[in-house]
Amino acid sequence: KKQELSSLILELKTELAEFPESQKEHAKSIADFTKISLDEAIRNEKDNELMSIAISGLNSSVRHFEASHINLTKITNSITGLLSNLGI
């Protein structure tokens, strides 16, 4: 799972790097919510409420791009799905 997650993170970084300059703030928001979600996932003392908030923020930040950046949506859905499958 760790390898799969690492691969998804690389795909996400590549996808976000291709955002036009006018959407860089949105790209940063997606990257930040992804990092927060991952940080919450690897904490020793899990807080399901904080994890839920982080994933909700990630999903909300991507929702705007569902039509224009389909691959971005697929990647973030895979990340959140993987985190959920880990029992988080």
Image (tube, helix red, strand yellow):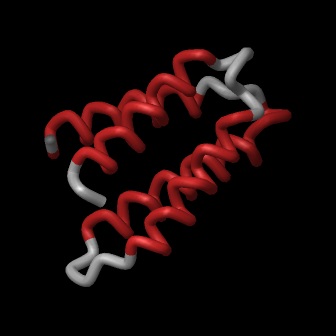
| Vertical arrangement, residue 78 with respect to residue 83, above or below | above
Q: Is residue 51 above or below residue 78?
A: below
Q: Does residue 4 appear to the left or right of 77 in the view shown?
A: left
What x and y, as percent, mark residue 63? 70, 35
Whole-percent x, y for residue 46 in the image: 30, 77
**Observer-nearest of 81 and 10:** 81
Is residue 34 toward the left or the right of residue 57 in the image?
left
In the displayed structure, 28 sits above or below 36; it is: above
Residue 60: x %, y % from top left: 68, 46
Query: How many marks overall?
Result: 0
User: Is the C terminus in the top left, top right, bottom left or bottom right quadrant?
Assistant: bottom left
Q: Residue furthest bottom?
A: 45
Horizontal and vertical percent for residue 64? 77, 33
**What residue lies at 48% left-to-right and 52% top-to-bottom?**
34
The reply, left or right, for residue 60 in relation to residue 70 is right
Q: Quadrant of the N terminus?
A: top left
Dividing the picture into quarters, in which one does residue 2 lie?
top left
The residue lying toward the viewer, choosing from 25 and 73, is: 73
Residue ID at (21%, 80%): 44
Q: 13 or 77, which lies in front?
A: 77
Query: Which residue: 39% across, 71% down?
Result: 48
Residue that lies at the very extreme toward the right in this rendered image: 22
